[in-house]
Image: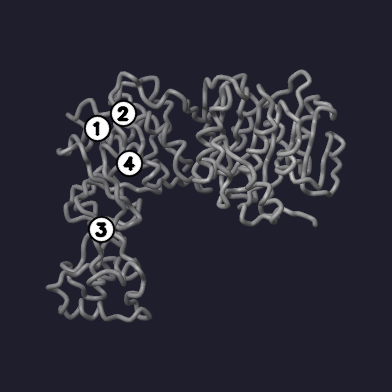
Amino acid sequence: MSLKIPHSGTVYTPDALADAMVRALGDGKNSAWLDPCVGEGAFVRAMASIGVPRSRVVAVDLDATPSRTDRLAETVRGKDFVSWAQGTPAQFDRIVANPPYVALARLDKPLLRSALALRHESSHPLRLKANYWCAFLLGAMRLLAPGGSLCMVLPAAWDYADYAATLRSKLPLRFRRFEVYRAGEPLFGAVQDGCIVIVGRGLGGTPSSSVRFELATTGELISSLKRSGRSAPSSGTVIHLTGQLEAPERRTALFNEAFDLHIGAVTGDARYFLLTEEERREHGLPVAALRRCVTRARHLRAADATAAAWTSLRDSGARVWLFRPPPRLEKDPAVSKYLKLKPARGGCHRRRFKVATRDPWYVTPLPARVDGFLSGMTRVGPWICLRRDERLTATNTLYTVRFRRADTWEQRAAWSISLLSPDVRRQLLVRGRRYPDGLLKYEPGDLHDLVLPVPHRAKGALAHYRALVAALLAHDRVLFARLIEQWFGEAKAAPTVPLLLAAK
């Protein structure tokens, strides 16, 4: 039987990237090289270009079709690498690869059996919800010799997927030095999701550093890879991930010790429950039958959510009214008419789960005690918009925040500044889901265990926070860094912390 990987799971490595990855590892005297999914041979061509002879290169591929580059290595075609890795006694000093990206559930059964037979360091097998690249990475680790180095292109899922959590946490500890490279644009034209390049140096050595490099472009990533191990990138942001998250002299607290984070109101039928001012007037609904709300990240325009800011949103045509009539208005003619509308005419889909389980169905539960709003989908990282209008609520496209350790607005502003601190921004760079257009999405679980500095003062915090948020939203890196420096007194650290966690 001829086994195949779904075509959509395979992308061929550009020669420039392959060359950079090979040069990132560098050749050693008599080093044995492995390419576990050779494809059209970009990596073996790169090996040959730095003088690695065929006798020291093994290349494996499931595709039995010969390639002109097969002569550059001891090539094994028509072979399932994952199965081969579990049976061969061979060891390699350098492994470089661009493994296939495909859900295990989509594999042919023999390939799936081989993948599920692999074990993590914790002895746990791969789960069916995992991806094939995990199996290739685990197989490669079985064959990497002590002191050896590995370089792989991986999907953006390396940063956020639950199935990759064990690899993210355990793999860096296996190497003397571990590096993660990410560009702000896709590495492959046909794949719009972002990609990661990982480099592990010195298998089995005492872990000394784990570093992440955030680069703006693919060209910068390739240039940085070529220089890796010899010099720091000439551009981009460097984030040291080991021993840098918490200064020993500063008191800290976890995010969930300082804040309660909850999802905004879930309507169950946003088209019906959320209205613009024009729609409210069109239906003749009295203001008393609705609640003021914010429904989008772009509605958070400043450090404070005030009545004036909401009015500006209303007048601009935003959907900032939540239909939620009190019982006393049920018989109001306009309200009664709106409640009775059929779905085909703009009425509510009452059979939807969130609506059908409510009594009465038209009263959307609201989050209790809201001190601020936070967007989990953002280009500038999570920040808190303080709720200064007590009539304002939010829907489930936003999170609501309650301060656990702050009673005054100055104290709340001080804690909000802590969320913008250099240490926290470094932590956020390796969390959340990254979308192809540069947008980041943070789930509550990505934020709960963030380590925040406990505010060292509250006086003047509100004015300072307003200036910080204005700089953040204006993408003013220089002013943002200067304001951070003024508050935290970190003249050296602040300018290296990115204002934007994603490219604009």
Which residue does the numbered mark 4 point to in the structure image? 383
Measured Cα–Cα span from mark 2 to mark 4: 15 Å
| Crowd tier of the residue under label 1, counting other residues whose Cα lies within 10 Å: few below 14, some 14–19, many 20 or above | some
Q: Nearer the viewer, mark 1 or mark 4?
A: 4
Hey, which residue is sitting farthest left in the picture?
328
Picture layout, residue 312 above or below residue 185 = below
Which residue does the numbered mark 2 point to in the structure image? 483
Q: Which of marks 3 and 2 is in front?
A: 3
| Crowd tier of the residue under label 4, counting other residues whose Cα lies within 10 Å: few below 14, some 14–19, many 20 or above | many
Which residue does the numbered mark 3 point to in the structure image? 293
Q: Quadrant of the N terminus?
A: bottom right
Earlier along the polypeptide chain: callout 3 or callout 4?
A: 3
Look at 26% across and 60% down and name the residue there: 314
**Are dots 1 and 4 in contact, CB under 8 Å?**
no
Classify residue 387 as left or right of residue 197. Answer: left
Picture layout, residue 166 above or below residue 377 = above
Picture layout, residue 82 above or below residue 31 = below
Which residue does the numbered mark 1 point to in the structure image? 464
Earlier along the polypeptide chain: callout 1 or callout 4?
A: 4
Earlier along the polypeptide chain: callout 3 or callout 1?
A: 3
- Look at the image and tell me whether residue 38 can be seen: yes
Q: Which amino acid does label 1 sit on?
A: His
Image coordinates for residue 234, horizontal then vertical, percent: 56, 25
Q: Nearer the viewer, mark 3 or mark 1?
A: 3
Secondary structure under tag 2 reads: helix
**Are dots 2 and 4 in contact, CB under 8 Å?**
no
